[in-house]
Image (tube, rainbow, N blue to C red):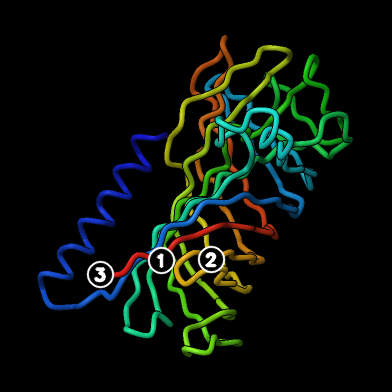
Amino acid sequence: MKKITMLVALSFLGGAAFAQKKGRRLTGMYIQWGYNTEWYTNSNIRIKMPNGTDFTLHQVKASDRPDMDAVYKKPLDVSIPQYNYRIGFYLNKKHTRAVELNFDHAKYIVNDWQTVKVTGTIDGVQVNGDSTLNPQTFLHFEHTDGANWLHFNYVQQQTLLARRDKKPLLTFIWKAGAGINIPRTDFTWRGDRLNNDFHVAGYNISAEGGVRLYALRKLFLEFTGKSGYVNYLNALSNSNAIKGIRARHSFGYIELIGTIGYDIGF
């Protein structure tokens, strides 16, 4: 996972350096780190196995897991909670427009013990009825090492309040972007659990808006709300005993994000 995001980040930085050489002058950059919480719409989850089992769970409910207590219990392990990081490059001197690499580490956990409609084929038998999601007798499904949305944003901000020197104090900021999903799916099939590998699986789109408060000239706090759509086309969902299991599902989400950032001038 770290290798994938590092490669993308280096590519992004390389592209910025190339743009500088070509005369498309960038005027600065910023970095951000913070945390998030999510709410998800219901999702239809299709599970396909190599033995012919192919079924869909309908209108499944899922939750996030912010794990914010880890911030003070394990302050050095900053990646336990649901986190966000951003690397952005300003496109004009007033720093009102930018492009941004954005990574959201969110957790998507199907709620156990809910009753859902199941249709399709399981072990060669046609099914069409309600079933309870019991991890020991049926299944459990989650992306807890990350639903992991990596995307590129276009960013624009407008000053709401300025300092005496006319530098921004409070700005309104909005973003829109799209990108790829890099999940790690933890799947349990009839008590047999496996935390699968990170891999690219599908795409996402989103829009975001909020405020940025410049506590100091270069240090800022940013609070935003984001709404988006995520589609997992081929999520790796093996168990220990069965390989080649794939899951497909999509959902909408609302995300609240708080970050701290720093401006770097060129």
Q: Nearer the viewer, residue 246 or 119?
A: 246
Quarter the C terminus occupies: bottom left
- For label 3, the SS is loop
Looking at numbered disc 1 in the image, what kind of residue is underneath it?
Asp
Residue 220's mark?
A: 2
Q: Kindly identify the residue that appears in the image at 62 percent across and 74 percent down.
A: 211
Q: Are marks 1 and 2 in contact (CB under 8 Å)?
A: yes
- Residue 114 is left or right of residue 252, and the answer is right
Q: Label 2 sits on what residue type? A: Phe
Image quarter hosting the N terminus: top left
Q: Residue at x 26, y 49 (%)?
A: 10
Query: Residue 88: horizontal and vertical position, in percent?
Result: 38, 64
Q: What amino acid is found at the position of numbered circle 3 in the picture?
A: Phe
Disc 3 marks which residue?
A: 266
Give the percent coordinates (x, y) of residue 82. 62, 43
Which residue is nearer to you in this view: 157 or 254? 157
SS label for mark 1: strand
Q: Are marks 3 and 2 in contact (CB under 8 Å)?
A: no
Mark seen at residue 263: 1
Q: How many residues crowd mark 2 within 10 Å: few (<14), some (14–19), many (20+)?
A: some
**Label 1 – label 2 distance at C-alpha:** 8 Å
